[in-house]
Amino acid sequence: MEMGVSGVKSILAQARRAAQRRGQEASTAHLLLAMLQGGGPVAELLRGQGVGEAELLRALGGGEAGGAMPRVLDRSAKIAEHLGHGEVSAFHLLLAIVRDRRSAAHRSLGERGLAGVQGAVLARMQEAHVELLLAVIDRMYAQFTHTIEENFAVER
């Protein structure tokens, strides 16, 4: 599964830079901080759930058990694949973080209410599915109408 144009590669790079500036190993808390600072719909969702930079910066000092980053990245790819999405997005990454109880980001979100963040992520992904389905239906209808008009010389 590819990390696509959805900004996940950029989030990873930003998280690594944030960790390097602090002399730390990149952690899932750094990923969360990068998502929050990066703007866009995931940042809006996090802020809407009351997640702020101050809490995340405190979580950065707590450290994280080895393997959390690869585990979260792997899980985000599996979530995207399970949902039938072609690439991993920041929403998949956030959902993987929310579900990884051993990660530093999960602990920092725990203070803000994981259920709220997870519910908001799932709701946003559901909205995206509906939008995609409507677009596909519109395209199919247009193709169907064009085919009918072409084959049966239907006048308007």
Image (tube, helix red, strand yellow):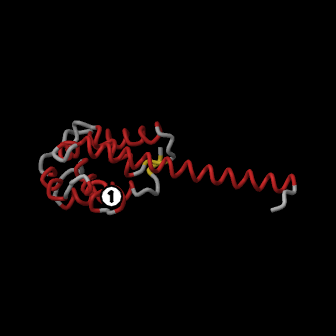
What residue is at 37 percent from the left and 44 percent from the top? 122
For this orientation, the residue located farthest to the front is: 156
Q: Check disc 1: other Cα within 10 Å, few if <14, some if 14-19, many if 20+.
A: some
Q: In the image shown, does 146 or 94 lie closer to the viewer?
A: 146
Picture quarter containing residue 34? Answer: bottom left
What residue is at 15 percent from the left and 54 percent from the top? 55
Q: Report the label total.
A: 1
Image coords of residue 7 (percent x, y): 40, 58
Image coords of residue 84 (percent x, y): 51, 40
Image coords of residue 100 (percent x, y): 27, 37
In the visual, does 142 lie left or right of 74? right
Q: In the image shown, does 10 or 44 lie closer to the viewer?
A: 44
Name the residue that disc number 1 marks: 13
Disc 1, SS:
helix
Image coords of residue 121 (percent x, y): 35, 47
Q: Which amino acid does label 1 sit on?
A: Ala
What residue is at 32 percent from the left and 63 percent from the top? 39
Quarter of the image for the C terminus: give it: bottom right
36, above or below 120, in the image: below
In the visual, does 12 lie left or right of 103? right
